[in-house]
Image: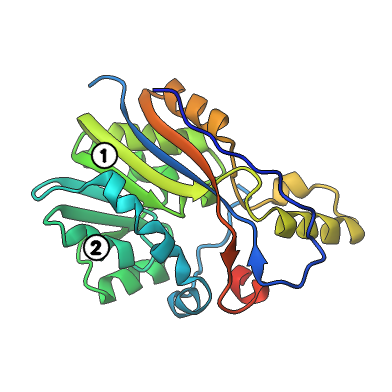
């Protein structure tokens, strides 16, 4: 099936004081075909809940696409504080959670996720070789855009974790996501004599076509890849969200 794609031109609103920021969410549903500019990982789970608690709420509908079944083994890649992991567990599936942030994994464990590990998606193959071909599905919400240093390796790692006929369902920031914020950061750095914004850019925001090609090149059959325009109101302000 060809990927579906919806786009909207994003207005230049870099000087707006509004707390509503344009976001573009890339949602993918796919199956295997055989059936450093990284941000610090010192996240604060309490600040995350205050400033970005909307993230798991917006990702919850993706669970319908995943359709977890009792007895399945599922990996939650970039689980954060485990809010959506708990919903996965309620399906009766056996869920393993990973996140690159140790504070977030502590929060997930405090929330009742017992099988939770501090692992970066780039290093899944190195850290857990025994997981190769062990999972019926891999789920990821609002995490893949942080895995910027080698997105292709992350995809290969996910592919290696899946059983034959397994599935990968994910949502993350897509092309032109938070564009007004990105433009403002680039402008501020340039004003201070830093012209190397691309190397400092902390996120990976591909188009649906780009990510579809990446997935197919690494052994996946893409069933759906959709770029969704999703204006998102922030509960506090951009400083709290970004910090």
State which mark lies toward you, 1 or 2.
Answer: 2
Placement of 215 over or under 34, stated as above or below: below
- Give percent across and percent down for residue 85: 27, 61
Q: Which picture quadrant has residue 167?
A: top left
Q: Nearer the viewer, residue 88 or 226?
A: 226
> Residue sitting at 40 percent across and 33 percent down?
224
Q: Which residue is mark 1?
A: 129
> Residue sitting at 29 percent across and 52 percent down?
63
Q: Residues within 10 Å of mark 1 (few under 14, many from 20)?
A: few
Q: Which picture quadrant has residue 22?
A: bottom right
- Give percent across and percent down for residue 130: 21, 40
Quadrant into which the C terminus falls? bottom right
Q: Residues within 10 Å of mark 2 (few under 14, many from 20)?
A: some
Q: Which residue is mark 2?
A: 87
Earlier sequence position, callout 1 versus callout 2: 2
> Residue sitting at 85 percent across and 49 percent down?
195
Local SS, label 2: helix
């Amino acid at each position: 099936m060809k990927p579906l794609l919806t786009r909207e031109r994003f207005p230049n609103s870099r000087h707006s004081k509004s707390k509503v920021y344009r976001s573009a969410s890339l949602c993918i549903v796919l199956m295997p075909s055989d059936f450093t500019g990284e941000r610090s990982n010192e996240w604060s789970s309490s600040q995350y809940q205050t400033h970005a608690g909307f993230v798991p709420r917006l990702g919850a509908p993706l669970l319908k696409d995943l359709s977890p079944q009792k007895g399945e083994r599922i990996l939650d890649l970039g689980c954060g504080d485990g809010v959506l992991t708990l919903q996965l567990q309620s399906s009766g599936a056996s869920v393993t959670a990973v996140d690159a942030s140790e504070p977030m994994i502590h929060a997930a464990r405090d929330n009742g996720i017992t099988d939770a590990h501090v692992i970066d998606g780039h290093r899944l193959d190195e850290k857990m070789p025994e997981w190769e071909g062990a999972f019926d599905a891999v789920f990821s919400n609002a995490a893949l855009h942080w895995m910027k240093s080698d997105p292709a390796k992350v995809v290969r790692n996910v592919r290696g974790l899946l059983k034959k006929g397994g599935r990968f369902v994910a949502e993350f920031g897509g092309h032109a996501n938070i564009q007004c914020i990105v433009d403002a950061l680039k402008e501020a750095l340039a004003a201070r004599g830093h012209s190397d914004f691309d190397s400092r850019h902390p996120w990976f925001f591909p188009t649906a076509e780009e990510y579809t090609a990446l997935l197919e090149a690494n052994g996946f059959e893409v069933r759906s890849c959709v770029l969704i325009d999703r204006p998102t109101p922030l509960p506090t302000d951009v400083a709290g969200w970004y910090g």
